[in-house]
Amino acid sequence: MEQRIGIERMEEAIDVFGSFDENIRLLEQEFAVSIVNRGGEIVISGDAEGVMLAEKAVQALLTLSKKGEAITEQHVRYVIGLCRSGQSEKIAELTQDVICITSKGRPVKPKTIGQKDYVDSILRNTVTIGVGPAGTGKTYLAVAAAVAAFRDKQVNRIILTRPAVEAGERLGFLPGDLQSKVDPYLRPLYDALFDMLGAETYQKYLERGNIEVAPLAYMRGRTLDDSFIILDEAQNTSREQMKMFLTRMGFGSKVVITGDVTQIDLPGDKPSGLKEAMKVLKGVEGIGIMELTQEDVVRHVMVQRIIEAYARYEEEKRADFRPDNRFGKGRR
């Protein structure tokens, strides 16, 4: 079977094919087809199902190219996943929403359907809980939404916080005063703000009190009005900390809580406040609970593979200990 796709501008074909045709090689390998650029047309040949999926993928990549996106391997792999799940038409939704512009003039926008739903939830709800693995953009997109709301004068302050819980290391061994000790925990939040605002503007707003980056313990006893508040790494909050944080919210404020329930650094006998909050707050009006997956990972493709490998390992480990495992493999 053969399918032809007309190209309006040669630049679009060059963009879709990629350097040394690397994007097209990915599609050919994935769908077992041949794809060539011939006389202003992209010609796809192979078996019927492969050609159908490859055509949808090429059309989706052309849509991105027409909207000014530079096509990367990440785009191609994501589009392949969408085509396989019958959602290729949704790719057009990703070209529409720019959350904010960074200090270097780069537009920040969702790169996956899951990220778009997450951003929509932040805009729509008073409280959004975003849960997912590393690399899904939970914190970065939340900070982008906070900066956009601040620039638009919807809020007067941006408050970023996270619990100071060690991931195997000890705070006491870090040099310096208390602020120096907690700064490494807050570094990802600083980095995202620097990217959005630039270091100079960030420092100006910090001195004025428009931006606050602090450990979660500093939130106790406060009421936060007209603020965009982000709690990062929330899987490491205790039940008491989570309840305390949620009740800090004042009038005109918006809250985003992010975390990864597979990376809890609390002692084994201490339940995660985030996991409990997801159960307690499910269905509460004004609260959105969004779960991102490895499909929404926008870092290096290896991050996605590592997450998938760990997920398989955990599933196999759980299967070994299930009561219905007849052979008792691994049971104690």
Image (spheres, rainbow, N blue to C red):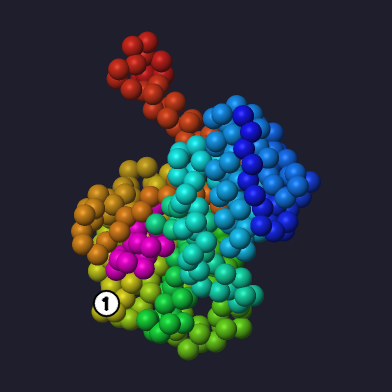
Residue drawn where x is 33% and y is 81% of the image? 226
Q: Residue furthest bottom?
A: 208
Residue drawn where x is 49% and y is 64% of the image? 96
Residue 83 coordinates in the image, percent (x, y): 51, 41
Seen in the picture, residue 29 relative to 261 is either above or below; the reply is above
Q: Which residue is label 1 attached to?
A: 250
Nearer to the camera, 116 or 172: 116
Residue 314 coordinates in the image, percent (x, y): 45, 32
State the SS at label 1.
loop
Nearer to the camera, 266 or 304: 304
Q: Amino acid at mark 1?
A: Gly
Nearer to the camera, 303 or 83: 83
Magenta stretch contains residue 328: no
Q: Is residue 130 left or right of residue 59?
A: left
Residue 268 coordinates in the image, percent (x, y): 37, 42
Seen in the picture, residue 30 relative to 164 is either above or below; the reply is above
Q: Residues within 10 Å of mark 1 (few under 14, many from 20)?
A: some
Image quarter for residue 240? bottom left
Q: Is residue 43 left or right of residue 314?
A: right
Q: Which residues are magenta?
A: 118-131
Seen in the picture, residue 80 relative to 165 is either above or below; the reply is above
Tell me the quarter of the image containing the C terminus: top left
Residue drawn where x is 68% and y is 40% of the image? 43
> Does residue 235 appear in this view?
no
